[in-house]
Every structure is written in C-alpha cells, then in structure tokens.
Amino acid sequence: MTTPTDPSAERIVLDALGAALAQEPADARIAIAYSGGLDSTVLLDATVRIAGAARCVAFHIHHGLSANADRWLAHCEEHAAALGVSFAARHVDVRRDPGVSLEAAARDARYRALDALCDSEHVRRIWLAQHADDQAETVLLQLLRGAGLAGLAAMAPEYRPAGAAVTRVRPLLHVLRAQLEDYARARALRWIDDESNADTRFARNALRHHVLPQLAVHFPGFRDALARTAAHAAAAQRLVDELARLDLQAVASEDGQSLSRDALLAFGDERALNLLRYWMRALGLPAASTARLTDALRQLRDVHDDHGLRVDHAGQTLRSYRGQIYWEAGDSGDPADETALIERPVSELTWRGEPVWRLPAWRGTFVFTEVAAGDPLAAEPAAAIPATLLTNQRLRVRARSGGERMRCDAHGPSRTLKNLFQERGVPSWKRDVPLLFVDDLLLFVPLLGVNLTALDALHANRAKVVQRADEQGGAAERRIRIDWREDLLIA
C-alpha cells in the first residue's frame, strides 16, 4: 500500500488514464460518470489533466435515494464548472421488481440514464471509476453467489452490453483504492461520502468493511489474485460463447427468434444449457438462474404436448410450437393462440402511385410494385390488384384488435386471422403485423396475402373505378403487387 505522501500514486493514475486515452479516437469527447465520490472525483480530475477540460463532459445521476442527493448534485455541478468541464445530470426513479435488490435496481437505473445522456450528447463511450478493490469485491460476491464463468469474469476493462450503443470503459480497473486516496490528498480534492456506503446490510459493504481488511492481512496479494481469476474466467467465457454461437447458427431460425426443439435436445445437458444462456443474452433477456434453465430443459425433454410447456422468466414465457421453441411476451395462454396485441397509432395514406409507404412505428415498409402484363402474377387476383382499385383510395394501417377475418381461397369461406396463421404455421411472435385497409375493408395482411372478400367488394364498385380509369388514361390495365418488408436493422 502506498503512503499518503508517495508520489507514485499520482503517476500510476495518470499513466492508467493516458493508456485509456490512447485508445480513444483523436479529439473524441470523453464522457465521465461523475457521482461526486472519491473514485469518480479522481477520475474526472485526472482526465481533465491528460485530455483537457474541453474534451470532457461529466454526467451525474440523481437517484433520489438519499436526503443529501440534491446537495450532491449541486456539489458535482459546481466542481465541474470549476474545472471548466461540461456537465449534465438526470433524475431517475429507482423501481424494484420482486426479487431485485435495491443495489441492482439503482445500478440498472443509473446505467440506463447514463446511456440516455450519452445519446443526447452524441458520445458512444463512457468512462467509469471502478478500481481494483471494486473488481475484487465483485469476484468475491459472485463466488459467494455460486456464479458461473460470466459472473466470475466480473467487470471488463471495456464492455458494451448486447443491444446497447454505449461502450463502458474502466481505465482504473488495475488501480488500488488506496492509490486513488493518495492522489486525492496530493491534489487536495473535495469529494462527497455517500452514507449508504457504511451500511453493512448491503452485501458489498459487508465485504468491504469486514472481509477485505482481513484478507489484506493474511493474503496481501488477494486483489491481484482475484483479478487473475476474473481474467481467466473471461477468457473461458469467450470460448464457451464461441461454441454457443456456432450451436445457435445450427439450430436457430433465420431471424434467431426460435430454436429447433429436437436439435437443441440432441445436445448434452451442459451444452444445451450453455446455448440457452447465450440465446437469451442475444435476445436481450436478463440471465436466468441455473435452476430455472434446468427446469426449462427438463420440460423440453419430458413434456411432449406443446400446451404443457411453461417456463416464465422476466415477463416472458418459453413456449413450444410445431417443433420450435421461442420466448413470448407476457401470459398469452395457449402457445398457438394470439400473441399480445400491441396498440399502435393508425396511419393513413391517399395512394397516388407511391412505390413505398414507410411505417416507422412498425419498423417496416409496404412496397407497391407494378406487375408487367406478361407476368403470370398479373392473372392472379390474390397476387396483383388492379391499380384502379387503389388509386386515390384512402389506405389505412392499424394493429390487430382480435377477431379480424379474411378469405384467401377463392372458393372457401372467410376465416379468422388467428386460424389462418395457425394453419400456415406462423408462430405467435410473428403475428403482430400491420393490417392494410381500404377505408374499412381489410385488404392485405402480411404473411397471409390479399383478402379476396375485400377485392369482391371493391370490384362491386366497378362503375366508379372504370370512370376513374378513363379519366386517368388506361390506368385500369396496370396491376399492383403489395409486399411487406421488415427493417433489417432493429433499433
């Protein structure tokens, strides 16, 4: 441990941040998570010294969990201004779901708010002040919780969560807290002390105040040893992730939303569980306990009736349908039944030959393509529609509300969309599609096609159509194919 007057602590901190700065794009702004505590105060001060105040922006999150939170916000804003650093803050409402600790809920809220601030300031990397003692605490906590490799890997020097746009950078991860204290004293820095850090009812605080001091006496190098453990676990995790990625390619649907049940069960239990964990991460689902995943695998092996499979996790339900397994939002009852119907605003367009109709709320586009006269599709009523049935018509798009019907077979009756989706094997998570209407007539449903009942009704109004066609100079000969194309990139 360094002494309060040891000048090497200042050099260690500045060198660590200098190495991190070298990895940043030239002249890129440096976002810093600034709570006002010792660690982030040192991070902010040292970053300003090596990068310059003009490149720095400090982000503060007001959790509202302490009576002193307003005072902390004022302190941080004042200190950032004294350094000449841009400053932004955001208030969060920490809400705890059942079984989630206050620490975890506050951490999740904090990271969401930091990501939002990064987005508003157009930065894609944020520096965090976690240090070597934090890393040791994290590894010990994960060990005591019986965590697997991912947990033991603890905090990475750089990490971007799945689906996130912001990379979290921890440039002080190999610096001791004692060295940060020495730096702060040498620089005469002022910081705030969060009173909750002394509350040993929190597991991390209990380790910090009661366990780590004893480890330091008997095992002086324990921090380095635990850091090596984290690095070994991270390396092993990368290997098992690569195996899971290859397995996912072999058993997943093209969009990755479902897995082949038989192919999954052909793996041994350990490999199948590894794949399930990786798949859930890829879908953005929170990690599930080993007990829950083991139960899911047991049900997949033992329950042969699709209706009998039921695994709930984080507001999702694992379902099986026609040999595929998938996660479905909420409690949707029968796995072959309707998915949860999502309300969206109604969109309208008076169609005058537009080739595309972009619908951001649906993350997709309706495409209207003219079919050549010699194309076989031109003779298929369900494949190509006379342009005069669409031109100057009020087209409307809305979400399913349940009970809609259409007729796909020229000689068959109308049937509910639910029955048609089931008959065609469309899994429930793909049934949330935009319905295209002409006024109040359901004309087209993605994955199902044109509603022949609506075509008959439009043809019955033929007199107006023919008149309109004459006015437009032969437009009646043109036929239009309608397609729905989902965005390739999910926001």
Image (tube, helix red, strand yellow):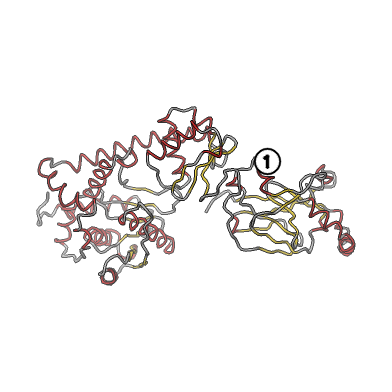
Residue carrying label 1: 424
* Residue at 39% from the left image edge and 61% from the top image edge: 113
Q: Measured from the top left, where is residue 458 in percent x and y? A: 82, 58
Front position in the image: 449 or 484: 449
Viewer can see residue 79:
no
Any part of residue 28 in sight: yes
Q: Is residue 327 above or below residue 342?
A: above
The answer to whether 417 is drawn above or below residue 68 in the figure is above
Residue type highlighted by circle 1: Arg
Give the residue at x 76% y 62%: 352
Q: Position of residue 142 (x, y in %)?
A: 28, 43
Frontmost residue, 75 versus 49: 75
Q: Is residue 450 left or right of residue 93?
A: right
96 horizontally vs 225: left or right: right
Q: Considering depth in this image, is 300 or 190 the residue closer to the camera?
A: 300
Camera-nearest residue between 183 and 310: 310
Disc 1 crowd rating (10 Å Cα; few below 14, some 14-19, many 20+) is few
- Picture mark count: 1
Q: Residue at x 19, y 49 (%)?
A: 207
Left/right of residue 431 with respect to residue 230 in the rendered view? right
In x, y percent, where is residue 484?
Answer: 67, 50
Is 243 left, or right, of 332 in this rendering?
left
Q: Residue sitting at 32 percent across and 60 percent down?
A: 32
Q: Work out whether 282 lies above or below 178.
A: above
Q: Residue 173 location, x and y as percent? A: 26, 49
Label 1 SS: loop
